[in-house]
Every structure is written in C-alpha cells, then in structure tokens.
Image: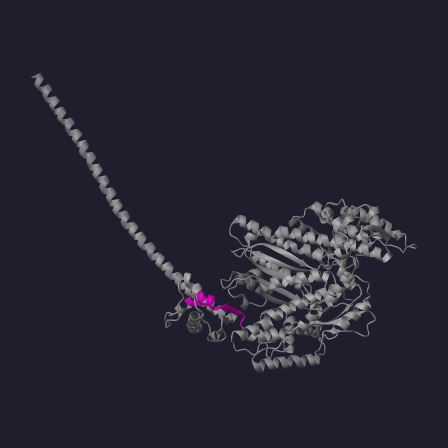
Amino acid sequence: MLQQVNGQSSGSDAHGRESLREDLQAFLGGEAPLHQLDDLTKVNPVTLETVLRCLQARYTADTFYTRAGCTLVALNPFKPIPQLYSPEVMQEYHTAPQPQKLKPHIFTVGEQTYRNVKSLIEPVNQSIVVSGESGAGKTWTSRCLMKFYAVVAASPTSWESHKIAERIEQRILNSNPVMEAFGNACTLRNNNSSRFGKFIQLQLNRAQQMTGAAVQTYLLEKTRVACQASSERNFHIFYQICKGASADERLQWHLAEGAAFSWLPNPERTLEEDCFEVTREAMLHLGIDAPTQNNIFQALAGLLHLGNTRFADSGNEAQPCPLMDDAKCSVRTAASLLRLPEDPLLETLRIRTIRAGRRQQVFRKPCSRAECDTRRDCLAKLVYARLFDWLVSVINSSICADPDSWTTFIGLLDVYGFESFPTNSLEQLCINYANEKLQQHFVAHYLRAQQEEYTAEGLEWSTVSYQDNQTCLDLIEGSPVSICSLINEECRLNRPSSAAQLQTRIESALAGSPCLGHNKLSREPSFIVVHYAGSVRYHTAGLVEKNKDPIPPELTRLLQQSQDPLLKVLFPADPEEKSQEEPSGQSRAPVLTVVSKFKASLEQLLQVLHSTTPHYIRCIKPNSQGRAQMFHQEEVLSQLEACGLVETIHISAAGFPIRVSHRNFVERYELLRRLCPGAAPSPHGPPPDEGRSEWSPGSEQATLQALLQDILHTLPALARAPAEATLAPVHCGRTKVFMTDSALELLERGRAQVLEQCARCIQGGWRRHRGRKKERQRRAAVLIQAAVRSWLTRKHIQRLHAAATVIKRAWQEWRVSTDLRSQGGQ
C-alpha cells in the first residue's frame, strides 16, 4: 500500500531508506534523479508507481509541469508563482527555436498549437483540452493560455493596427473576470470552481494575428442562485456587490452592511475572487457602461431580497399562503429593485394559473408553501440565467471578429471537472457525463485511433491495452434504454412518480450494466454510476423536476411588466407568446429537457473538437485540502489511473505524432535531395503544377520511396550529434509518412539549410545581375557624357566662329570707312 505523504517527515526511517534506495539506484544505473526527468516517457520502467514517484519528486522541487508524451501533466501548486507566468517567460517560449527543448510548461503547448496553425504542412484548426478534477487548476490554466496568445498573436507592425490589436487583446482578457464573477463559485473542493463549461475560439487571420474570439457556454448551474450546499457559496458576483460597492450604492440597492441574506451563505470568507472593481472595470472595457452596470447590480440585489421572501402555511387551501412578518419588507424591496409592481409579484408567487378545457378556460389556484418557494426560486433562476446569457452575447459582440477577417482558430476548452459530493443530483450527472465524453474523445483520438492507424498503414506496432469507458457511456446515454432516456421518459409522461420508483425503474431496466451499482445501506433513493474517475452516488429525488426545468408562463409575463431597462431587454414582450404558452391535449409540443439540450450542445462541441488537432493538458490535484507542499499519493494515484496516463506514456514513447500525406511530403521535402550528392534525379519526378492532380498512385509511391531513401541518407548530415539521427526515425506507410518530433525537426532544419543555400544563390545571382546592370549603366553614362561634351564643344566652337565672323566683318567695315575718310581729306 502506498504511503500517504503530506509534505512533512512521516516515518523518518522509511523515508530515509527510500531516499537511499533512490540515490543508490540512480548512482548504479547512471540515471538522472527523478525530479530532473521532464518527460515521463523517460521513466524506467513506466508503471503507476514510478510515474507517481517522479511527479512527487518534481512537486517537492517546485516543478509543476511534466510531459507525458502528447499530454502535459500540470500539478496544482496551490500557491501564487507570478514569475512562472510573466511576459518575459511568454516571450522566451515564443521566440525559442525549439520550445520543446525548454522546461515543460503550458506555454510549450500554447506555442506548439500556435506554430501548428502557422505550419505550411496541412494547416488545420487547433484545440487545447484542459481536463481534470474540480480544483485541479483548469480555469487558471485556461486564463494563462489566453494571456499567452494575447501577447504572442497580437504583434502587428503599423501603429494603427497595433492599437486595434491591443484593444482586441484587452477585451479578450477582460472577458475572463466577468465570466468568472458571474459563473464561478466556491465549492467544497475548489474556491473558484467554474459552474459552467466554456469553449473559447481565438480567431486568427492569415498572418496568424489574433483578430477576435468567440465564447460558447454550456450548462450554467443556475440552481446555485437559490440553493447552495452546506459550506458552499453563491456565485462570486453576489459577494462582490455586497463587499465592494460604495456606501451610496449599498444604500441605493438596500444592501446594509452586515445584512443577512438566505441566498448568501458564508459571507465571512474572504477570497481573492471577491474583487468588485476588477469586474466593473472589465465590464466597462467590454462596452457595458456604468448605467447598465448599475441596472445589473440592482437586479442582483433584488434577487437577494427575493430570497428573503418566506411564506407561512395557509390554514385554508382556498386562500394564498401569507408572508412571514419579516418577509414583507423583503418582498417590497425586491419589487422596488426589480421595478415590478408589488401586488402582481406576490400574486404570481402565491397563485398558479391553470388552463383547461377546449376553450382554455383559466382557473386560479392558490399554491402551497412548498410551491410558493419553488416559484420564488424559479423566478430568481430565470432572471439570472437570462442575465448570464445576455452577458455572454455582449462579450461575443465585443470580441468576435468579422467572419471574413479570420481563417483559423485555436480553441480552449475549460469544462467543469469531475465532481462527487455527499449529495449529487442532475447537475453532477451532466458534469460527469461531459467528462466521460471528453475522456472518450481522448481515448478515441489518441489511444485507439493512433493504434488503429498504425496497423492500417502497415507499421510494425505492438498493441497497448487501455481502459475504455464506452460501457459507462452506454449506461448514461445509450440506446434504446439508458439513465438519460429513462429520466426523459418520466418527463414526457408527466405523471407523478416518487424518487423510489425512479430508482427501481433505473435499476431494473439497466441491471445488466457493470457500471451501475446500488448502495443497499443508503436510506435515500439513489443509484451508483462507476465512472472512469470513480464511483458516484446520485440521488433520484428532484431529478425529474430538474430535468423538466419548468418555467410557469405567468413568471415570464410578470417580468415583461418590469420597468427596468435591463429586464425589458432580457424579457421582451412577445405578442405570439400567449398562444403558445399552454398548448393543450394532443397539440402539446414535445418536452425539451435539460439533459436533451445538454446532450445536443455536447455533441456539437465534440464535432468541433474532432475537426481540430487536439492537445491535452491533464491537471492533477495533489491534495483535496487545497494546501501547498502537500502531496497525497493515494489521491494522485486515483487520478492517474482514471485518465489512463500510463497507457498514454507507452503509446507516446513508441508512437509517431507527426504524420503527413505522401503528396505533401514529396512537395515539401523533395528539395532535400540537394543535400545528397549521389542522388540522381528521380525518373518519376513531379510534373509541373498543372499535372499534379493526375499522378497515379504507383508513380507517386515510387517517387516517395526514392525520395525517402535519399532523405534518410541526409539525416546523419543534418544531425548535430550521431545519436540524433538514430533517434529520429521516419516510416513510410501506405498513404502517409510517420515520424517523430525530432525527425520533423531534422527535416525542417535540412529544408531551411537548402532554402538558405537557394537564397544565397538567388542573392548572388541578383548581385551579379545588379553589378552587370550597373556596369552597363556606367558605360552608357560615359558614352552619354562624352557625346554631351562633344556636342557642347561643337556648340562652343560654332559660337566662337560666329563671333569671329561678326568681329571680322565689323573690322573690315571700319577699315573701309576709315580709308574713305582719309581719302576725302586729301
């Protein structure tokens, strides 16, 4: 049995012997200490125990990131380490020629996905799937990756473009605090737990500059607004407005200091997420002005006062339930803050409207105390869910780029982690169902698909066994009978059924599934599902009602009467709504349940993921207490087993993550034949571009084989060390070429070398051409100058001749006149 370690000396003798054994093994075997192994594929032998010891040694040495083949393992340090995520570190990984040679980091994965988008080899959209238990650090990892891309993918040259990119970058980063304030909460296992799933598309243009982003959310846990488990809290934003608002604002929103609210448990706990000014500043940058913010916070304050509205039992079933004495002020304040008329608000909460008969006659029936509480909670959940969806739409309109301005994207998936609480209901079932689907995506894409592709391509491969969770998914979503189908059927039948009856039906219909269990000692109706990450007991009480998620139409009509500008946007008046509110008899539309909607959105997400090249970050939670320097081996071991990390390491160590089609390989690397002096021109060389589409498979295969042999001869010359070439195998499959990262690095190095030689030849030819051209220009200039000088000389001589003629003629005339005067005097 593994010993549980909490960071202190526990059993000094045993610890000393273990350390001595490790040192002796490292000395005799010549191996590096465990904390220096950056890649778990280098652990020898690869077992759960050795992987666990390596991770623990690195965690003790404050090294929290480790490669596991295609996956990055991230241990949550549970303490701030700002120097690990500084802009200088981002630039270091971004500008590094080979970032994979640096220490493992989430920025390594970020830079790899960014370079893959830029790659000229079959560029394709990229995605990063961040998975792990609740509290393992998924939200923090996604936040740091967004900051990384905002820095490295927003660097245009012109000043105007730089200001635009800077504004986009700021808006994308500002979406984080807003969504975390309205969508995150403190749970038993995580102080900043995401209570919704989100997939962020970072949109890039052809120059790989980030032009915008788009956010898609999944299954907000809106029930948390009105119901919080013991020792848990409501969404962060409620605590922020109570703690961070000014005195005038608290007076305006009727939030007296120290006031008690039923829906605001554990207000004494101070968390770093309670940062109201950061949220307001971020909302302002996203285009939500101060008046709109005031309307939002006023509505949230109204929900808090609505939660203090309590009802008493009515002595007469024909009369509505009276308010508790201390609740009269609360309902008045709630109506004022929501800008609703007080009497219709009370009437809607206490009286149910029933439509019956062919003529749809309206009957009014007073609600019981429990029904009043349910309608009050439903009203709060409805307002908050609409507000959250509106915020997401505002964020998207602020950061989303025009469809024509981007060509590729990098997706970041931050989904809720696996959850198991003392009481688990529909929310936990959906969350764990999503985790099962993501685990299946990882298994299908990497573990199973890679091995099947190696076999189909004819590569020599020893099959690695792995844990498949298809049986559990068949139990949850399978056809024709599954947990989801049974719950949905209960909703469609719309018949009264107890929690015990639902439990009995699930157990009898799915008794043959090995992933279904039952705790006979439990007094409450429940069933157990054996997930890949562990067994979870789900309580059947309330499952059907939560799946229906009924919204009484009179609640919507009431909110449409609000004079608040924000609520008018959230609940616009619909003239056609009345005719569609209560369809009767056989005209009733099929019920669209929570499970059905969630399943559809999940399938759509998986289609997007399947269309991208995925990268995986496995976040591991070292301990359940959330304390630094504490490593619980048993808890970490269960997480390693659940995610199939050892199988991943085995396949990654022997696998070929880079695969290129024959045609693209020939087109990109045929120029490497220049590095092989003995290589003769291929008789099957590629024809001109216009004929490439007419290649026959035989000629292409022959060209590839000849080219591949020549390239393999060039690898030793490209390698900086003799061993580098042997560690960089290239294999030719039936339709693709398979290689490791090191082989791709060598090929790209050789290609860059050839291109550099070609560039030098082109530059030399261009310089010779320029020299000859300048020489011709110089000679032409000399000839032109000589001609001009000759012409100028001739013109000058002509002018001299003309002047001499004039002078001579004048002199002759003067002599004649002088002679005539002298003769006349005689």
Q: Which residues are magenta?
A: 656-671
Identify which residue, 419 or 585, lies in the foreground: 585
Question: Which picture quadrant has residue 805?
Answer: top left
Q: How is the image coloured?
A: one colour
Residue 254: x percent and y percent? Answer: 80, 48
540 vs 681, left or right, is: right
Direction left: furthest residue:
826
Residue at far right of view: 315
Q: Residue 658, how many percent across, how many down? A: 52, 69
Compared with 109, 511 (above or below) is below
Q: Is residue 521 visible?
A: yes
Q: How many marks?
A: 0
Asked if residue 132 is positioned above or below residue 581 in the image, the reply reads below
- Within the magenta stretch, is there residue 662? yes
Image quadrant where residue 632 sits: bottom right
Q: Nearer the viewer, residue 95 or 409?
A: 409
- Residue found farthest to the top: 825
Image quadrant holding the C terminus, namely top left
The answer to whether any part of residue 38 appears in the image is: no
Residue 788, given in percent of the width and then of the height, sits at 25, 42
Q: Nearer the viewer, residue 104 or 752?
A: 752
Horizontal and vertical percent position of residue 147:
61, 58
Quadrant into which the N terminus falls: bottom right
Instruction: Name the dominant secondary structure of the magenta segment.
Output: helix
Height in image: 143 above or below 579?
Answer: below
- Name the one closer to the observer, 372 or 657: 372
Residue 276 is a magenta residue: no
